Image (tube, grey):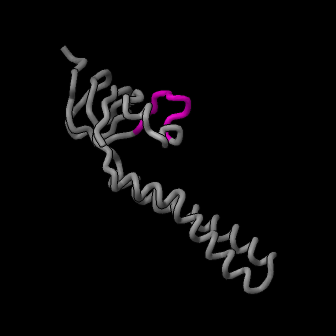
Amino acid sequence: MKEKGEIIESRGFDAKVCIEPSEACKHCAASHLCRQDGESRVIEVENKVGAHVGDEVYIEISATIGFVAFFLLFGLPVILGLIGVVFGSRYNDTYAIFLGVAGFALGLIIAKVINNIVSKKHTFLPHIIEIVKSNRT
C-alpha cells in the first residue's frame, strides 16, 4: 500500500511521517482501527532516500507485514487463550478460566518480545520510496 505524508522528524535513516487520511480510508471498514475519528497518524519509517523535515513523501507499507503484525497482536493471544481454555476445561471451569487468561497473556508477551527483536532490525518498518515535494531550496 502506497501512502503520502509529510516528514515531521528525521534521524539518520529513520523518520517520522504524518499521514493524512486518504480517500480510500474514508471508505474502508477498518479505518476506525488505525485512525481514531479520521485523524492523521504518525508512523516511523525507514528513510534511505535522504528526505528531510517538511518534505512530502510517498511511503510503502507491505500488506504482508500488516497481516503478520495483525496476527501477532490479535491472533496469537486469542489462539493461545483458546488453547488454554480447552486444556483447562478437561479439569474444571476454574482451570479453564485460569489457563485461558494465562494463554492470552503469554500470547501478548510473545508478541511484545517479537516486536522488540524485529524493531531493532527495522524489518517491518514501512519505507520511503519517493520524495514528492522537497522542502529544501
Image x and y of residue 111, in percent? 51, 61
Please identify the quadrant where the N terminus is shown: top left
Q: Residue at x 50, y 35 (%)?
A: 35
Which portion, as a residue range, is magenta?
A: 34-43
Q: Residue at x 53, y 65 (%)?
A: 76
Q: Identify whether 104 is placed above or below 88.
A: above
Residue 137, located in which quarter of the rendered image? top left
**Please, which residue is most extreme toward the top here?**
137
**Please, which residue is most extreme toward the bottom here?**
90
Residue 15 falls inside the magenta stretch = no
Left/right placement of residue 66 relative to residue 79 reads left
Q: Residue at x 32, y 39 (%)?
A: 14
Residue 35 falls inside the magenta stretch = yes
Residue 119 in sight here: yes
Q: Identify whether 97 is placed above or below 131.
A: below
Q: Residue at x 52, y 62 (%)?
A: 75
Left/right placement of residue 4 relative to residue 88 reads left
